[in-house]
Amino acid sequence: MELLIQLALNGLALGALYALMAVGFALIFGTTKIFHFAHGATFVLAAYTYYAAVSEAGLPVAFALGLCAAVALGFGLACERFVYRPMLRSESASLTIFVASFGLFIAAENAVILVFGSSYHTLESRLSRALQLGPFAISPVGLCAIVASATILGALEFFLARTYTGAALRAMADNPELVRMIGLNRYYYAKVAFAVGSLMVVPAAVLSVYLSGLSPQSGAWITLVAIASTIVGGVGSLYGAALGGIVLGVAQNVGIWRLPASWGEGIAFGVLLLFLLFRPTGLIHVFERR
Amino acid sequence: MISYLESLLIFTALAIILASSLNLVLGYGGMFSVAHAVFYGVGAYTASLLALHLSNSLVLSILCAIITGGLAGLLLAVPALRVKEEYFVVASLGFQIIASTVFNQWDAVTGGIGGLTGIPPASLFGYEIDSYGAHLVVTSLLAAAVLAIVAALMRSSFGRALRALRDDEQALSSLGRNPTHLRLVTVALSAMIASVAGVLYAYFTSFVNPESFTLDESVMMMVMVIIGGAGTVWGPPLGAAFVTIFPALLSFLKLPSSLLGPVQRLTYGVIMTLLMIYEPAGIVGLLRWVRRRQIILNGINGSNRAAA
Amino acid sequence: MTSSKWLRSLLVGALSVLASAMPLTVSAQDYSIGVIFPLSGPNVVYGETFSKGVDLAVKNLNESEELPHRIKTLYEDSRALPQPAIIAMNKLVNVENVPFVISAFSGVTKAIAPIATRRKVLVMNGGGVSPELAGLSPYLFNDIPLVNDEISALLPYVTSKLHLRRISLIYVNDPFGQGVLGVFSAQCPKLGCEAIPISISPTASDFQAEVAKIRSAKSDAVFIASYGQQQNVILKQLRDGGINAQLLSYSGIDLPDTLRLPAAQGLIFTVENVDLGSDDPITKKFNESFRAVYHSEPSFYQVNYYNAVVLFAACVKRLVAKNQPVTGENLLQALREIKTFNVVGGTVSFQPNGTVRQAIQIMKVVDGQPQPLAVVK
């Protein structure tokens, strides 16, 4: 039983990171309808920038964070401006856009491998050593993940609910035609969605360098998780995506209570497939229906 | 040198079978699957287990692989019936990851990461297929057969119905076809063909393990179809040839071997993105464009001459 | 140009590039040997370590002109995984026609062994230690004691001297790790200890779930059966997770960078006992040239791989004397006839199942350096 609770705790910390990735993806997908597979490339680029800045260039953490945010923001906006916008203008099919995004992802992942090699990197920090809480242990980094995730999601909620730009983004998600009719510039709001979504990658990327280490292949996994969380949570709902991330993180950990940990990935995606088959509208709508 | 070319051509022929079969689902059916390596793997494991425990007959192996591959295909067809477009992509990703986990963990059957070793050479009508030359002949003949089947299928009413399913599901019912039935058949057929490639692969390398059937492999198959031109008969084989022969061309650059893979994939990624922006019909689309320009230029030349 | 002409010229161009990209054919006079090591990926550190041994031996032998022709090594990258290894082995055997291949890693060696048997190519493994490698192929020889010998030496020591009873075993779920698990399950009941097996995937890099399982198992010791960078990650995460149990491992952890990690302090592990103090000419030559070329102390891995080439040269010398061609079959015959070889550290002879028996040394990491605790014959 202790083990089960400990695994759930681990899952919660991991799920908090997943939630950040998922909400960023869901925000972009919801408002622009672009299936931004390269979101995981943003993650890998941001994480490696931070790692290189701290470990190889020896820069102070605050400066490294700024650099990392700049890279994430730059990559997200470049994708929007140079790949998706021309394709939207020429009215490409959504699958065509997806394939272009997939291509970007493959290119970015391998560019990182060319520079840093394909093996793991981790950063040492006092904060990654576990705190003992009675029979349980959780690392300060894991706690940071949970706190950061809650704070950022709260801030996003405020932005979407209380600002004019936020309201326009919500309108774009609900009714893109209406937005065009009242004369809002949809490319401007797409840019905002990509900027906010890509910036949300930064805390997830930095914390995961400390929490579980870094490898270029982690991008594929994190993208899949972000997409899966969005679907498990319910497309169109940011709360749903966050909840989906936490559910997947916990499922991946608790699922291996009695199994070898190598089953974790399979279990997380088993959950996803079950949702796709039986609840394609996601968790949020399960609750709403009640 | 000869054996090197032979093995390169064998892998090209395998890639052609895989890309053409994926094209049925992805190009013609419009169902964007990233799980094709699963069926390749199912075929390879079926043949290996048969050869190690029962019989190394190529015909029997292919028949059995078609059955197991088809059944695995039906598993993927279930989500294909319920969800569309990007959601199906994600479902197929999930399917691939679960299958990879099973290949890795089901030690008793798949041998886990250590794999199944010492698969004997296949026998066909009493001959043992042992040399590279014999493998090349068998693989090329089967690749040609697959291309012929795909081409014939697409000219038939089945092909027309499939394209209608992709472009306009409403129109399909006017053709008197059941979309559910059509999707099931397409995914299963495509899986069967891919599993035949798995059989050939297992006998050629005499070794199978989960590394050959990962998400990465599925993505490479998708890359072949996309780069060549999805939904055309000749695009995927062209793409397959490009993706298999390109690394050999890269070795001309004398890069260290650890950089070859990333450079290759980086190139594919960039090509894919650029093609999607400028020419979503892939290499075949580019060739068509060149030909159209030729015709126009010839036309202009011709009319100039006539005027002169 | 019409499009078909365009296509044709493209094909011709591609083929000519292909032809010029072929490796230059080696002089028929050279003895080509294949080497399948991880040259990229998370285990590249082993490839770099091992190849120092091979390269030094080839350099020394070519300079000494003991053989009528030069030895030439053809390196292929296995990434320490079976599937790339199969491609490499097929290339070496079918395209380069090498009679002799040096291999590393259990999964790799297990995968290429059937090809060695079928194509009659002698394979010498100096790094893979899975017990499964014993007797796998008449053409496979391991000039490294297998891990069952190491664990047979370690377990009595830790149970009787250190009174460790509950041992969590983190093992990679591949031929090597499964071999370790097999030895633990066979030996623990006899020694009154209990093994708690926890399997991990060879590509895993996040072990928080495993750490949680180890903590709840309340074990006295944790045995790490992994390799390469994964070992470093496991060590770090065990320490970060607050596991204070005695850490145990095997020879694969004996890498300078790993032993220097703060998390590795106090770790107890085993290695084969190599006597580099012996003053026979081969050992002396090895010691001197190794320090001269690499400016560092050799590890037992480098001894094994140096010896792999020395063994090959001894067999070739015998074939030259008998005026026989250097084929895999003849090499095997020569190896069986010579029986006992003079190598670095003394003499070596193979048991019928293709393995060597050597004394095992138990080491403890103190201040980043391995210190010997005991030698088990």
Image (cartoon, coloured by chain):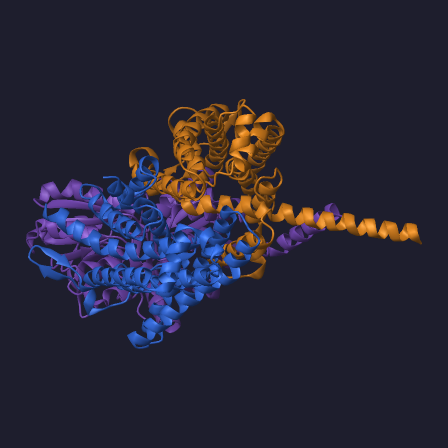
Residue A130 visible? The answer is: yes
Which chain is the one coloured purple? C
Left or right: where B72 falls relative to A151? right
Find chain B in the image and tell me its colour.
orange
Percent coordinates x, y for residue C260 in the rendering: 23, 68
- Name the residue rendered at 26%, 39% in the picture: A289
Where residue B185 appears, as percent x and y from the top left, is 48, 27
Residue appearing at x 59%, y 58% in the figure: B252
The residue closer to the viewer here, B175 or C152, is: B175
Q: Quadrant of the C terminus of chain B?
A: bottom right
User: In the rendered view, does A158 fall on the left or right side of B96?
Assistant: left
Viewer-side residue, C96 vs B229: B229
* The image quarter in which residue C255 lies: bottom left
Q: Is residue C260 above or below residue C2?
A: below
Is A137 placed above or below B186 here?
below
Is residue C18 found left or right of C223 in the rendered image? Answer: right
Q: Is residue C377 visible?
A: no
**Residue B213 lies in what quarter of the image?**
top left
Q: Is C322 in front, or is B36? A: B36
